[in-house]
Image (spheres, rainbow, N blue to C red):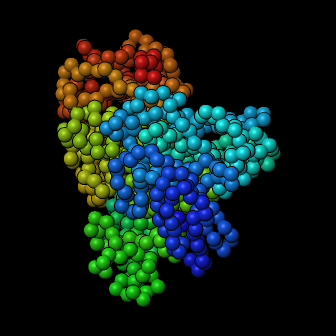
Amino acid sequence: MELAPRDPDPAATYAWRVERAPPGAEATVDDRPVQWFRPDVPGRYVLALSAPDGVHRQTVRCFDAGSSGDGERDRDAGASGGVLDVAGDDGGTSGYGHDAAGASGGGEHGDGHGRPRIRLDGRVTDDAVVIEADARPHPGDDAPPSSLDVTFAFDDRDDLRAADTSVAGHRLRVPRERLPERARIHAVAVSPERYSVPDAVEIVRDGAGGVAVRRPYDPPAWATDAVYYEVYLRTFAPEAEHGGTFRALADRLDHLDSLGVDVLWLTPVLAADHAPHGYNITDFFSLAADLGDRADYRRLVEAAHERGMRVLFDLVLNHSARAHPYFRDAYRNPASDYRDWYEWQPSGEPGTYFDWEHIANFDFETLDVRRHLLDAVDAWAPLVDGFRCDMAWAVPDGFWREVHDRVKARDADFLLLDETIPYIPEFQAGLFDVHFDSTTYAALRSVGTGWAPAEALLDAVAERADVGFPDHARFLLYAENHDETRYLVECGRPAALAAAGALCTLPGAPLVYAGQELGQLGRRDALVWAAADDALADHYRRLLALRRAMPALAADAALERIDYAVREGEPERVVAYGRVNRDGDGDGAGAGDGSSGPSGDDPGDASAAVVVCNFAEGSATVDLGVSAGTRDAATGESVAADGGVRVDSVAVLPAPPAAFDDGA
């Protein structure tokens, strides 16, 4: 795990020491302000940091809970993963650690024991705050929840101690008279073989004597069911002149509004080198001159806000361009003031990934780097609604956790979206709010090209829990982006129509890449607005509108497998599944005569539905195996057929929630 001072002063002196360790531990620290600490035996460690403003303590709990066999992440020296220690006689915790075997907690394993999951919720009574831990075994483990231990933890930064609380099973109680102004309580579920991703709640007092319990790891409410749209800035509005891109984009916002877009992800807007994608930054505090000035950028954000859209800033922290003046000064110059800002290979070339020749990785063990990037975070966060975090896997977890706490302290509704391939369950624990679902993306590609059966999409969604994500984790679904060949090109139009249906009906928030809805064929080419595929755009509009309206398609609605059968068509190219919102406000009536949604009601209000996606050319007749309507809620047209329903690309059919009771 990474040890680093927060909000660092590069000119100050910092010193770590191991203040407490389990018997037999030999883990040590050195004299560097930023370093990696590797616990070597299970138990409780307390690390003390001497800083200009006093001594700070970070407590780490190490569990001996098996080994995942996943190996180490590229950037993190040691495993990802982490659990917090329950407070001992001198306080609580704020640090994350790893089990003694260096595991990340583990996903599915050959022994049948995968990673458990946990969720914390709180309620306030007249005399106490009660925290309930919903601990669940891995989906493939038939052990009961009672077989799991729950370890609660108290944050070192708060004035709450174990002696102030009582624990009974999976429940913790804090008397109101013992509550400080703020208390952060963490917990982890532990099985004999694995441990969960931590979860947390925050208890806060208000000025009127009231008490509230919050869930700090949940995404902002606006982000959960939003429709995201990626704008590749330098080709989205090809009519823009030099310095006019922000203005031209603002002029095209009405198209995105009509599509149903809620969130704009703009590729990097900062000064960069020659590469048009903008990810090779040359100045972290200046906008790219060819895009526009700060006033133009502010007006674009304001125009988006006027239409109810949020704006994401593409945050690049792993590296700078080699054209950055600091790198140019440091390159082949050991005496440079910026030499230790970068990683260096034995050859004298900078550290990088994938042989990318125009970037250089920052060295996060250098306090000046951390200070510089935190200042950049502070500069841009107030202007936007969230960060899309580029190459999140390559930046140390501890730095992301500091970024998370920093932006959330200013605005609790600020979004952090991680780009991580493959996704990392630990990123759910106080690092990011929403995660790129690269697993479902890969399945969509394999299904679209015919390399995998369509039902692989359901396996991909199930993989989230399989690797250890808790049920409350939220994901971004995508079929393409600026790094990938257009889905339409690789998979063809029939599959592209079905993929749009999957994006809008599987659990998660859909992302549309600029031009995807227009039938654009070039990955990063200038959008050809005059040649837009209006039928495809209308297809997206209908599906996105239905997803917004229908409770059954909400991000937190359950995904249910059903026993369907393809009577006519290509069975391997068809998938059918149920969506059920058991806590939603939708209509829960029966399916009436089967020719529409719940009898007499708008089918878009349904709290349960069956979705059929057909990736093949030509229609398919499908016996759903469950009770459902036969009128597609997206088009309003009947899809009734002998032996079931006939589907060309996608159909969303309202159903009674009781049809899925066996899967509850």
Considering depth in this image, is 655 or 30 the residue closer to the camera? 30
How far across and down, in percent of the image, does residue 598 sit?
46, 17
Residue that appears at 51% across and 72% down: 30
**Residue 23 visible within the image:** yes
588 horizontally vs 171: left or right: left
Residue that appears at 42% across and 89% down: 335
Residue that appears at 53% across and 64% down: 3
Q: Where is 170 relative to 642, above or below?
A: below
Considering every residue shown, the one lying at the far top of the view is: 593
**Residue 291 visible within the image:** no
How far across and down, in percent of the image, does residue 130 sit?
68, 36
How far across and down, in percent of the image, does residue 362 sit?
42, 71
How far across and down, in percent of the image, does residue 325 sit?
42, 81
176 horizontally vs 397: left or right: right
514 horizontally vs 258: left or right: left
Q: Where is 231 relative to 378, above or below?
A: above
Residue that appears at 42% across and 18% down: 662
Q: Count the marks: how many?
A: 0
- The quadrant the C terminus occupies is top left
Q: Where is 301 relative to 517, above or below?
A: below
